[in-house]
Amino acid sequence: MSNEEKKTITAQTAVDDDEPDEWDKRIFSTGCADENTKLTDCYYEKKDWRICKREMEVFRECWKRHGNDKRTDSKDV
């Protein structure tokens, strides 16, 4: 198999893998997918949740605004 064929197969696999999975569908259904992405990106970059407090607060506000706290029976602590 040539390098070009390998690149083509790799590119096709990446495109195929871009379909939303069950986790993605679940996050999209909350109405807070963008906030979740920003929060997880912050943690990925910083490796410390304490640095991502603002992103966490924005996500928490979105979560409540969309009624997800009632749906998941979460509690404020």
Image (tube, rainbow, N blue to C red):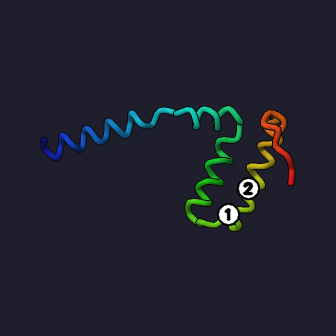
Q: Which mark is residue 49?
A: 1
Q: Is 5 positioned to the left or the right of 69 in the image?
A: left
Query: Marks 1/2: CA distance?
Result: 8 Å
State which mark lies toward you, 1 or 2. 1
Q: Is 20 positioned to the left or the right of 7 in the image?
A: right
CB-based contact (under 8 Å), mark 1 and mark 2: yes
Q: Amino acid at mark 2?
A: Met
x and y, in percent, of residue 8 in the image:
24, 39
Between discs 1 and 2, the one toward the N terminus: 1
x and y, in percent, of residue 70 in the image:
84, 36
- Residue at the outermost right position: 76
| Residue depicted at x 76% and y 52% | 58
Residue at label 2?
Answer: 56
x and y, in percent, of residue 65 in the image:
82, 40
Q: Amino acid at mark 1?
A: Trp
Is 43 above or below relative to 68? below
Element carrying mark 1: helix
Q: Which mark is residue 6?
A: none
Is 48 above or below relative to 28? below
Q: Is 17 positioned to the left or the right of 24 in the image?
A: left
Element carrying mark 2: helix
Q: Residues within 10 Å of mark 2 (few under 14, many from 20)?
A: many
Q: Residues within 10 Å of mark 1 (few under 14, many from 20)?
A: some
Q: For residue 69, what is the image quadrant?
A: top right
- For the N terminus, give its image quadrant: top left
- For the C terminus, give its image quadrant: bottom right
Q: Is 5 positioned to the left or the right of 25 in the image?
A: left
x and y, in percent, of residue 25 in the image:
60, 32
| Residue depicted at x 68% and y 67% | 51
| Residue depicted at x 13% and y 44% | 2
| Total numbered badges shown on the rendered structure | 2
